[in-house]
Amino acid sequence: MNATDEHSELGFASLAVRAGQVRTQEGEHAEPIFLTSSFVFANAAEAAARFSTATGNIYSRFTNPTVRVFQERLAALEGGESCIATGSGMAAILATCMALLKSGDHIVSASGVFGTTVSLFNQYLSKFGIVVSYVRLSEPAAWKVAIRPETRLFFLETPSNPLMELADIRALADLAHAHDILLVVDNCFCTPALQQPFTLGADLVIHSGTKYLDGQGRCVGGAVVGDRQRVGVDVYGFLRTAGPSLSPFNAWVFLKGLETLQLRMRAHSEAALRLARWLETQPAVARVYYPGLPSHPQHELAKRQQSGFGGIVSFDLHGGREAAWTLIDATRLISITANLGDAKSTITHPATTTHGRLTPQEREAAGIGEGLVRISVGLEDLANIQADLERGLRRLA
């Protein structure tokens, strides 16, 4: 189903609440959770027909009504034709690569992607003969130089984790399509509430639903959004066979998260901008990474490409790891955890957590220094967040 056609008259907020829902004969108002592993057929002929066409409810590994509503709603919000939900954001990346690539193919990836994505590419895809090259996210010329005859896919996160660097999606889409390459954009940090990669030329969009789509740190899940063939047939085929599936309960939780996504992203963005401005005034802070600041080298691109700047603020501290850990350990309100996108503010030290599995050389290439701290700004009172950070900043004075 092309969600954009069916709901073309609805705005984003309406889609986030209504898209994809089909009421059962019970007449429920909220979406039901179909906690069932299998589905009953009227007769043998119906069973045979469903298995041969793979349409209708068959088995919850690959067909479940609750998961289907989430898929259709997220596709509608992103403006894609099809969506396949997966058990995690990493499963979404894996499913995309396994479905669309083969041995001998080449990926060009941004060097600053999530550390576990690098591990997936380098340790596991390499076993199947898929080669990955890494380039600076913000330098289209470097992407062009990295292209080979066997290049099939560009992969990037924008904004990047944790340095909030941006890619010019339109420029990379034009470059990719000129060489018959797919552009895959991880839209986790902005979500469709703040950024629409398909309108800028992206071919596929990846999500970790665990983050802002949920919004309260409750469940793990992911999704791939794209066209009917690559996602609706190819990625779906991998999911049906390999089974990195999203549970119906988690899909239902994400549905509830989508209903408030736009409101939350506006609130996260407003608080993060105010916090970033405040951090720039602190003597212990060497640099703040936030695209909403005029000091960010891609501030103008962020204003063109995004409708908001997001809820992630990263900053370098004078004093390296010792200073970073001192600040983190002094917090009492902010949660020390590597997750993000939660109503609760979180803080982490990327060099020893999210990017800790990378080699020192890989972290250096990605710009992940020992003094770097990442905060996912939640929905608490900003004054309380600042006071919590100020406790540690005073110790660094």
Image (cartoon, rainbow, N blue to C red):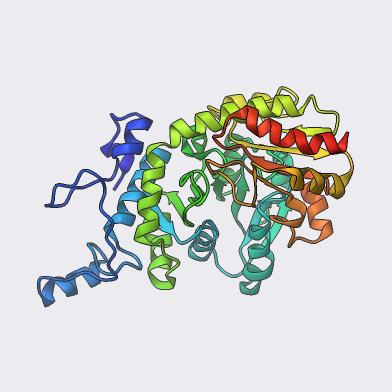
Is residue 176 visible to us here?
A: yes
In the displayed structure, 50 sits above or below 249; it is below
Visible residue check, residue 301: no
Q: Nearer the viewer, residue 330 or 217?
A: 330
Q: Quadrant of residue 176?
A: top right
Residue situated in front as seen by the camera: 35 or 200: 35
Residue appearing at x 29%, y 61% in the figure: 64
Q: In the rendered image, which quarter contains the C terminus?
A: top right
The image position of residue 291, as x and y in percent, is 67, 30
Position of 338 with respect to 285 (left or right) is left
> Residue at left 63%, top 66%?
130
389 left or right, relative to 5: right
Q: Quadrant of residue 238?
A: bottom left
**In front of the other: 36 or 42:** 36
Q: Is residue 311 left or right of residue 34?
A: right
Could you tell me residue 182's position as x and y percent?
54, 50
* 68 sits to left or right of 238: left
Q: Is residue 94 placed above or below 162 in the rendered structure?
A: below
- Furthest toward the bottom, the residue is 44
Number of marks in the image?
Answer: 0
Residue name at image x 71 percent, y 22 percent? 294
Q: Position of residue 243 (x, y in %)?
A: 42, 70
Residue 315: % across, % down = 76, 37
